[in-house]
Image (cartoon, rainbow, N blue to C red):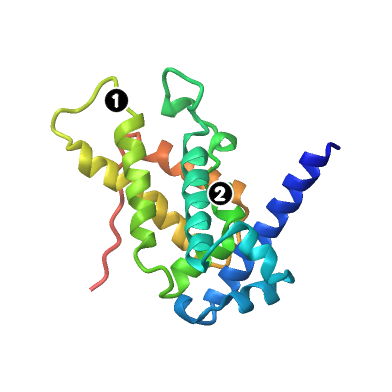
Amino acid sequence: MSKNHSIDRRIAKSKQALKDALISLMQKKDFKEITITDLVQLANLNRGTFYKHYQYKEDLLEEMLDDIISNLIASYREPYINSETFEVKKLTSSAIKIFDHVDKYRGFYTLIVQSSALSGFQNKICHVLKDLVLHDLYDHHPDAKIDRELQASFHAYAIFGMMVEWINQGFKYSSTYVAEQLLKIIQFSQVNTVFKLHLTE
């Protein structure tokens, strides 16, 4: 292993320790109350290491949020990133990586779903998903009666709804299982479905 590669790994490890510490602390106190000392003590690092990478705790938070959004976008695009067309009927559950993304950042997603920390970031995620649908996916046979903005919103909030349900259930399913369920739901919604009603007074 080269010296530079070893240094890069050490930097990445230190930064990840600080981000993990930040998420853990934000589960217990407001961001404004968190100090650099709190962060480095929990991450088992010294203050010099923090200031080598960041000037303020806000810089750490901003980098963490940017990392998560970038990974979210890459995960969403995984099924079609190297393709000219994307046929939903050929989609496989193994190609769906967005729930692997949620699992990778489960501490962060639990924080934003189950606490008031970073209020508004749920909407940010939904906006990112909506923009991906609008900008990446063009229907070859669009229905002129369907509003694309509303369709993209439906898609984004449906996926986020599955994320929230999974998180609130304590990640009791694997990411593979949730991806399989999303695929089944998509396939189910593509056919003309008739529901038997069971109404109670």
Real-space Cα distance between discs 1 and 2? 26 Å
> Which residue is at a point 55% across and 37% down the rendered structure image?
93
Q: Locate the C terminus and report the quarter of the image it occupies.
A: bottom left
Give the residue type at disc 1.
Asp
Q: Is residue 63 above or below residue 146?
A: below
Q: Position of residue 161 (x, y in %)?
A: 40, 57
Q: Nearer the viewer, residue 175 or 66?
A: 66
Considering depth in this image, is 110 or 4 the residue closer to the camera?
4
Instruction: Reply above or below: 98 against 54.
Output: above
Res. 95 image quadrant: top right
Q: Is residue 104 left or right of residue 183?
A: right
Disc 1 vs disc 2: which is toward the camera? 2
Q: Which mark is on residue 19?
A: none
Disc 1 and disc 2 in contact, CB within 8 angstroms: no
Q: Total label count? A: 2
Residue beneath disc 2? 101
Residue at left offset 38%, top offset 60%? 122
Q: Secondary structure at mark 2?
A: helix
Q: In which quadrant will I find the N terminus?
A: top right
60 on left or right of 40? left
> What amino acid is found at the position of numbered circle 2 in the picture?
His
Q: Residue at (53%, 78%) from the top-left corner?
A: 34
Residue at left 34%, top 29%?
137
Q: Which residue is mark 1?
A: 139
Q: Earlier in the sequence, mark 1 or mark 2?
A: 2
Residue 172, image x, y percentages: 61, 63
